[in-house]
Image (cartoon, grey):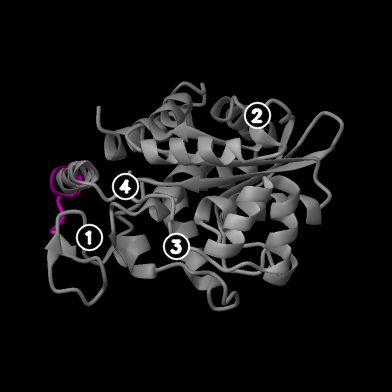
Amino acid sequence: MNNSNSTKSIIEKYREKQSDYRDRVLNEPSGVGPYRYSKEKHGNMLVNGEVTGSNFISKAAYNYAKQKVLDKEVNKYLTIDEYRLFNNMLSSMPMCFNLFADLRQMLTNDTNEVTRIVKELFTEIVWIDKVCFIDIEFIPLPIEKFINDKSAFDAIIIAQDKQGLKGVISIETKYTDILGENTSPESENKKKLATQLFSKNLVEELKENGYKQIHRNLLLTLSFAKENNYKYFHNIIISPNEDKLSINQVEELKSEMKKYKDSICKISLEEFVKRGINCNNVSYSGLMKYFKSRYIID
């Protein structure tokens, strides 16, 4: 997805999908956006979503989103926009809670079942034997130990293999937004990690032009793995089929990687949801069917 006319039509198509869901399923009025004090109404904006929880498809997702907003009181690095989280139906932030909050809650009671589901969801990752931890809107602290900026994981899964060796799976979710083109400057940590992972040409380019989101996400994942002495690290991008730009970005980045080329990949949102529906867990399968009706355009 880029800023071309075709992308604008894609955004409009998904806005129409969310507007229809708000009107037909939720039976709620449209709100203003994209900001709290905006004047213009949009079909994808809710009214008082903080109270109604209508931007979420389960109690687990809504309750954990509220908890994360409270966490900002003690973690100044969290960059959660509360109004967007609770009221913007096009935002990928609540979408991420809708995908992973119930798995996170389920993990407290049934590690084996969550492990089985996660293996179904991430068939590209073959070493998973036990899921140990799931979180959403996770930023490794202190940031100075990692890549020294406010980059965060939309979702994170920590798992281990049959020998007990651990790995991290970081997840970036996108709906109508694209992988950020905004850049952050070089730091010593970024430079050191980039030199290990990327070609000399890309390292020089990043030094001159800054690190885009796709670079920061992968380097933060590698840094987190190294800091915790993990054997494995993977950065997964989940976005709709129509997001061709992220596929190109991933392939372009892989061509500049000296090693660990299988550590980054794109999974389409449609494929991910299909795997969830077919995971043979009544609760999560039902949730993903609901998710499909809310987010996916057939």
Q: Which of marks 4 and 2 is nearer the N terminus?
A: 4
Circle 1/circle 4 CB separation < 8 Å: no
**Residue beneath disc 4:** 2
Mark drawn on residue 46 = 1
Give the amino acid at mark 3.
Answer: Asn
Q: How many marks?
A: 4
Give yes or no for contact between labels 3 and 2 (Cβ–Cβ under 8 Å).
no
Instruction: Name the residue beneath numbered marker 2.
Output: 125
- Left or right side of 145 for 276: left
Residue in the picture at 18% in, 43% down: 9
- Amino acid at the residue labelled 4: Asn
The image quarter in which residue 187 lies:
bottom right
Q: In this view, does 243 lie to the left or right of 230?
A: left
* Residue 231 screen position, x and y as percent: 81, 40
- Residue 292: x and y, percent? 33, 33
Judging from the image, what secondary structure is the residue with disc 1 in?
loop
Q: Which mark is residue 182?
A: 3
Q: Tag 1: Cα neighbours inside 10 Å, few (<14), some, or many (≥20)?
A: many
Separation of marks 4 and 3 at Cα, in angstroms:
13 Å
Q: Is residue 146 shown above or below 153?
A: below
**Label 3: which secondary element:** loop
State the separation of the CA atoms marked 3 and 1: 28 Å
Tell me the amino acid under the disc marked 2: Ile
| Closer to viewer: mark 4 or mark 2 | 4
